[in-house]
Amino acid sequence: MISITANTSPSACVHGQRSLSKALTEGFAWVVFSWLLLVLVQTPVLAQSSNPEQEALPEITDAASIRMPADMSKVDFYLITVDVGNHVWDNFGHTALRVVDSESNSDLVFNWGLFDISVGNVTFASNFLRGILNYQLGVSPPGWELGRYEREQRTVWQDRLNLTNEQKATLYRRLAWNLREENIVYSYQYFFDNCTTRVRDYLNEALGGRLESQNRAPVQSTFRDEVMAHYASVPYVAFGLDVLMNDRIDRRMTQWEEMFLPSGLRQELLGFPSDVNLNGQRQPMLTDGTVVMEFQPPDAGPNPYHVAALLLLLPVALLFFRLKRIPLASFSSQTGFTLRSPGLSYRLLGVVGGLVALCSGLFGLVMTVAWLESGHLDLHHNLNLLLFWPTDLIGFVYALRWLFFGKGCAVSKTHHNVIIVYLLCHLLALLGYVFVALTGLAAQEVDSLLLYVVPALLGLALLVWNAGFSAVRKIRFF
């Protein structure tokens, strides 16, 4: 749904140690409890507000100043639908309008998917995360526009829109209004205001609101379903979006909302009746459909959750079988755990632990920053913050020690207590996550995470708790 045009104009005694542990435990427990309560309280409220009413298009106050074609019967509008591509930004496809005026011999394509990346990748990514997405309308000859899709090897369909002369005039007038300098840039919203919804809304205006009023029924799929389906060819992106986006994308769409997809808009218009009659028969909204160019769509990749289970759950299960009980010290009746074949087992723990710490920390950091700073409401109040914490990035340091030295990390008693308290809080948050998910207290769809990722996180936390660290006891001589 996104077309990229560069440079376009238009995150010390035993008593003292016990007090520290108790204080840390209580403090972290209250943080987890407050966090959980905050998520539970906000989730249903924001879920209810995620169904914005369709805003009316701005009125064209000086319509008389717009130069119109003398004969609207000589003007034809075509819906251009572009299939998905193999890049992150084009996995939803694209929609444009082609306007052909045979009297003035003009032929132009209107494309609402342009944005400026001349600010640099870092600034652009920062603006994207903060919700600053200034897209704009671009107009170009069809040869230039279609040539780009040919180079990208994306299938293109073209269908003629059956409109009355009055409807054509309304649509033409809106396009002319959109070309004005003050209207050419708009604030992009990937579900509610994008290159496809612009065409949908303008066409709905020309039809007197009939397209919207006759498409209010809910469909079976949710926004999350469409995100996962359209990013199947880039499974790592699908996984990341599934983690980062909250319950706002988990309600069922209406037929109207489903037309945010290029394929959804075309499919609806193919069966939608127009107000044009030919030989006494009412014509469908789209006719004279042609495949301008055809290419094989990108193949779907592996299920990202199956990959996650393979990379995490299997190694964690294997390491559990490598646990063995050992005395904590010579002549001691107290026992602890270590891993058999430590040179190999701890290095495997380092690989798995490092991967989890890095991904969990980054996910947690992005979700936290997005909640505080981003204008994308779909990135706020995310239930997955109970699983992924920004502070987990610290665990990457310990994972490197397991990987390089092939043994558990020896730390001071106080240091060990802090780690155990941290792991305990993670386990409490994880159990809270499972409880919320299974009882339906939150509207966010987390079934895949619950099935494929949570068991691995639980097992890894227990492994690290039991065998990842050993407390060094100091011998004092008096």
Image (cartoon, grey):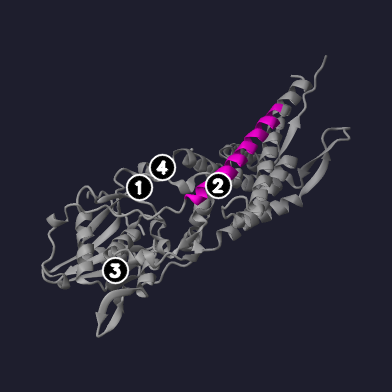
**Mark toward the start of the polypeptide (1 vs 3):** 3
Q: Amino acid at mark 1?
A: Leu
**Which residue is at the front of the view, 19 or 233?**
19
Report the mark closest to the observer, 3 or 2: 2
Q: Which mark is residue 130?
A: 4
Per the rendering, the mark at residue 12 is: none
What is the C-alpha distance between the residues marked 3 and 4? Answer: 32 Å
Residue drawn at the location 53% of the way across and 52% of the way down: 247
Q: How far apart in space, not on screen, are marks 1 and 3 (Cα)?
A: 25 Å
Mark 2 residue type:
Thr
| Percent x, y of residue 393 | 57, 39
Q: Tell me which segment is drawn in magenta.
A: 23-49
Residue 205 drawn above or below residue 345: below
Residue 289 visible from this viewpoint: no
Tell me how far mark 3 sits from mark 2, CA to CA. 38 Å
Cα distance in 3D space between marks 1 and 2:
25 Å
